[in-house]
Image (cartoon, rainbow, N blue to C red):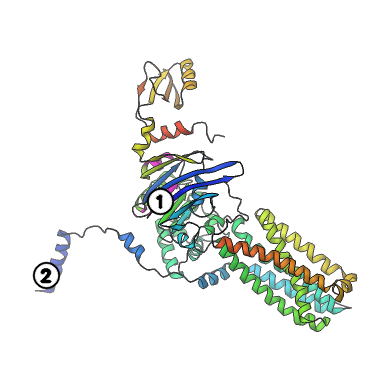
Amino acid sequence: MELIFDRVTKQYKEKIAVDRVSLSLTQGVYGLLGANGAGKTTLMRLMCGVLRPDSGEILYNGTKVEEEAYRDILGYLPQQFGYYPDFSAMDFLMYLGSLKGMPKKRASEKSRELLELAGLSHVAKKKIKTFSGGMKQRLGIAQSLLNNPEVLVLDEPTAGLDPKERVKFRNIVSKLGNDRIVLLSTHIVSDVEHIADVILLMKDGAIIHKGSLEEIIQAIEGKVWECTVDSHAAERLMGQYPALNVREEKEGTFLRLVCGEKPAEHAVQAAATLEDLYLYYFSGEGQM
Amino acid sequence: MPRLFKYQLKKEMQQAFPAPPPQGKEEFLRGFPYPKAKRIEMVGVQVSYIRKWTWALSLLAVALALLAGRNFGQESSGFWMLSCLSAAMPVLAVLAVTETFRSSVYGMAELEIAAKYNLPQVLLVRMGILGGADILLMLLGVPWIVQEGGFSSLRAAVYLLVPWVGTCAIAFQIEKYVKGREGIWCCAAFAMFLCAPSLAGRQFWQQIYGNGTFYLWLAALVVFAAAMGNQVWRICCASKGLEEWKWNLFLTG
């Protein structure tokens, strides 16, 4: 089981969305992190054959992702998806089941099973337009699992889920990663931290880091400092170093910074987290 | 050994030596040859997903055209019948083509593209079903026109096909460039634009449907059929993954 990206590039007019990405994914859960516009969604669409690369190719066990045989083993949850207005949850799953080549009986059995898993059994016959955002997202996750896919691509799957639903989702995905390739993108760093075996950090269309949580935070290990200083010193330090956290306290301004050397006399070193790494690389990007 | 004792022994053995947790259960289940639906089943399913009002409006358009052609024509009733049916053709074409808009209008396109039977295949099936039904409806009108207007069957068929194929070809172009619901309105407006001259051009009937202009109808049919054939070919290429599906996607993010 191996999915190979071979120098894949995708360009929209002047903007290079995916820039010569070469990757090899084997079974496990991969978390894709990056700021808005980093190219995550484009990479996922290329992986699902929704878009075609301008150059390079993506192969799964030697099969091109544009082929029907690949789509047969693919499960995909897009960042945004809709539904036909008259569809109930069950209709939606049955319709996608038919497009996934499932016979009616099997699609019906699998739909019921997945509605149960998604906690939507009690609203199986209800119109989707009456659903909350979280329910729609759970339905989207359910449809991606209909054909028991070998490759599962989830674009921001936890968007709209409450903390309890997110924990349930994480557990399901962790289990799924045992015997298939799962790639998920999210802005919620803790989701990636908890479920991804391998983290991919994407910036300006390129994968800048790939590795386990421990490996990936090595990049800033020993460089995270915390200190409480007066407002003038705080302003000076924030100008000099990337600030990970700023908090006004009684004694002064609390700062969490990334820098190669001790930034202030009373500064203490702190253990680096994935969120620190994310903020270090992406502070100032994708902001409104 | 008494049966009850045997049962108890079995139960206790099970408790003392529990079965190990399944290893590779998912892999085993996935390797199980679950039957796949045949392509023809997918076609059958798609028939049921075509909106009922698309069928109803198509039938209504042809029924109204036949009714108007039979009952409201005073003079040159053959030309009147032809005009009425000809005016219904763009409506049929737009109803068929706009059925292909649904995926993008309702945000299902991306899900459908990534499915085994992907969006281009689904569109080909829907177009095939609706196109076939429209041609059957057209065939209903041909004998009437032949009988009332004294045209040959070929000429009657060409007069009906040109507005239908022409509308389809142009509606596909509109679909490529105009987003979602706006595209549907543009196609509808264009169909109305084509309907109006068919009904209003009473004084030009002799010139429009005369022997001398028939070659223009044939030329128009060839041009529109080629344009439509090109669109269908592009969809076929996209369905086989030879081309990127760009129509009406307007992907963001």
Which residue: 48% across, 40% down? A206
Chain name for mark 1: A
In the picture, which quadrant includes the C terminus of chain A? Answer: top right
Mark 1 lies on a secondary structure that is strand
What range of the chain is rendered magenta?
A176-193
Q: Marks 2 and 1: which is nearer the front?
A: 1
Foreground pick, A108 / A119: A108
Q: CA distance from mark 2 to mark 1?
A: 50 Å
**Chain letter of disc 2?**
B
Residue at the disc numbered 1: A182
Instruction: Residue under label 2, please give it.
Output: B5
x and y, in percent, of residue A271 in the image: 34, 29
Which percent across, then down, holds residue B231? 65, 62
| Residue B90 visible | no
Location of the N terminus of chain A by quadrant is bottom left
Outermost residue on the bottom side: it is B147
Q: Residue at x 63, y 55 (%)?
A: B248
The answer to if B169 sits in the magenta stretch is: no
Same chain for marks 2 and 1? no
Q: Residue at x 63, y 67 (%)?
A: B127
- Say which element carries label 2: helix
Please name the amino acid that badge 2 sits on. Answer: Phe
Instruction: Establish if A98 lies above or below A202.
Output: below
- Residue type beneath disc 1: Val
Front one among B208 and A76: B208
